[in-house]
């Protein structure tokens, strides 16, 4: 049975490689007109059936300005049939061949399948802020072993959240330095709007009336393992912490969607983006959520019992021991450090310095800058 499964996986990967290296470039050449279609912008993603949150603000702004034609091509390539996958890629290549702009926000292999025309600008918004865990060509497992060429080929602009992140992205993607632009991450614009923050607080207390008047602690760990076998080693420790916290503290546990079935205690239906404005203390381990949260200049705590082992296994761009918050490695110390962090309130100096180094491009006007660059 396992042998048959392995053969199927092998054949599927090589079918994808044949499509990537042979069919898609051919379609691109056949569909390519003499001139690009001025004003045509293609928004594409292979991980979502609807517009991704990392891309949504720019889609909305381009449509609002009304002087460009926006084509949106989204699907979850991991969970669709091969015929549908093939159809979606062919549709993309048809528009790719004539577009003035192509906008993506994650790995999207069809963009890198051929030598694109110079008149087309590919903008990679990326989906995460900062540069924490190593990715791309800086770590094993991120790039398919069968893929020939650079996965990130054809990118003209990669937006990063601050100048300090650019060298790490350049290392991970193996692209020229000029490609990486510290324009910020457009999905962070909402965190700077009072209307958004007020709406999040209102919604939170409507859904959690028992949290009114309490300090809000958010635990948001990184995803580990694989979708088929997710792992969350600190889970029991956080449940124990919940039972020890005083009445005036409300704990929200927000795990990755791939983890929620195996670890069912997830006591809020709100997204992490909706939870950040109401959070008084963030507890995480190795999640990039710390970058978004530092916008609010509030304290954070890192519960990482396996800090040394995980750092060796995955690799970090940052010195983990210099992150802007207390690091806890022993569960016996967790309650004490949580209460201590809550008593401090804002932790301006350390968090502000971290923001300046890794998030300074995020100022609430990122989407506007990107739309201006595109001439929208």
Image (spheres, grey):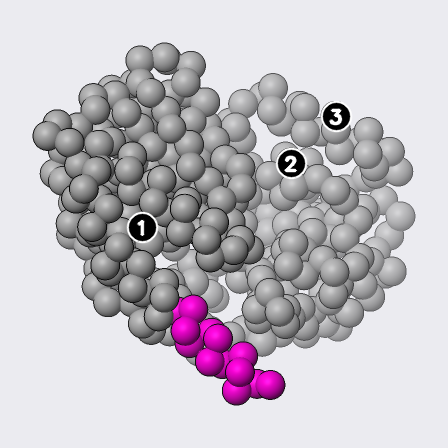
Question: Which mark is first along the chain, 1 or 2?
Answer: 1
> Residue 298: x percent and y percent?
59, 42
Give me the residue at 79% from left, 59% from top.
264
Res. 110 mark? 1
Between discs 1 and 3, the one toward the N terminus: 1
Q: Does the magenta stretch include residue 8?
A: yes
**Residue at 22% over, 32% down:** 98
Placement of 217 over or under 190, stated as above or below: below
- Return the mark for residue 274: 2
Q: Where is residue 293 in the image (x, y as percent from the top left)?
A: 55, 43
| In contact (CB < 8 Å): disc 1 and disc 3 | no
Viewer-proximal residue among 182 and 332 = 182
Structural crowding at the residue carrying mark 2, measured as other residues with C-alpha within 10 Å and reported as few (<14), some (14–19) or many (≥20): some
Q: Which residue is drawn at 60% across and 51% down?
A: 300
| Disc sitting over residue 202 in the figure | 3
Q: Start and end of the magenta stretch?
A: 1-13
| Left/right of residue 122 with respect to residue 286 in the rendered view | left
């Amino acid at each position: 049975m396992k042998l048959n499964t392995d053969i199927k996986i092998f054949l599927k990967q090589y079918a994808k490689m044949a499509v990537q290296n042979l069919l898609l470039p051919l379609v691109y050449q056949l569909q390519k007109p003499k001139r690009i279609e001025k004003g045509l912008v293609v928004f594409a993603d292979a991980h979502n059936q609807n517009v991704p949150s990392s891309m949504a603000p720019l889609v909305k702004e381009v449509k609002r300005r009304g002087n460009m034609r926006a084509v949106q091509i989204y699907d979850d390539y991991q969970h669709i049939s091969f015929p549908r996958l093939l159809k979606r890629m062919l549709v993309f290549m048809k528009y790719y061949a004539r577009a003035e702009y192509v906008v993506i926000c994650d790995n999207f292999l069809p963009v890198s399948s051929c030598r694109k025309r110079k008149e087309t600008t590919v903008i990679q918004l990326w989906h995460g802020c900062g540069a924490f865990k190593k990715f791309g060509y800086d770590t094993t497992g991120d790039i398919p072993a069968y893929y020939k060429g650079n996965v990130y080929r054809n990118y003209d602009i990669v937006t990063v959240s601050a100048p300090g992140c650019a060298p790490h992205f350049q290392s991970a993607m193996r692209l020229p330095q000029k490609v990486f632009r510290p324009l910020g991450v457009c999905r962070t614009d909402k965190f700077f709007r009072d209307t958004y923050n007020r709406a999040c607080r209102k919604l939170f207390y409507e859904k959690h009336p028992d949290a009114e008047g309490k300090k809000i602690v958010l635990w948001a760990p990184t995803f580990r393992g694989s979708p088929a076998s997710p792992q969350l080693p600190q889970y029991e420790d956080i449940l124990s912490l919940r039972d020890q916290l005083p009445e005036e503290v409300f704990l929200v546990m927000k795990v990755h969607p791939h983890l929620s079935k195996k670890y069912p205690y997830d006591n809020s239906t709100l997204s992490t983006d909706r939870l950040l404005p109401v959070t008084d203390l963030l507890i995480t381990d190795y999640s990039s959520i710390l970058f978004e949260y530092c916008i609010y200049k509030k304290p954070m705590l890192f519960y990482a019992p396996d800090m040394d082992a995980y750092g060796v296994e995955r690799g970090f761009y940052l010195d983990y021991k210099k992150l802007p918050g207390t690091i806890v490695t022993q569960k016996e110390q967790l309650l004490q450090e949580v209460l201590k962090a809550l008593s401090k309130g804002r932790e301006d100096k350390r968090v502000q310095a971290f923001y300046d180094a890794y998030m300074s491009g995020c100022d609430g006007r990122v989407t506007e800058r990107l739309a201006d660059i595109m001439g929208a």
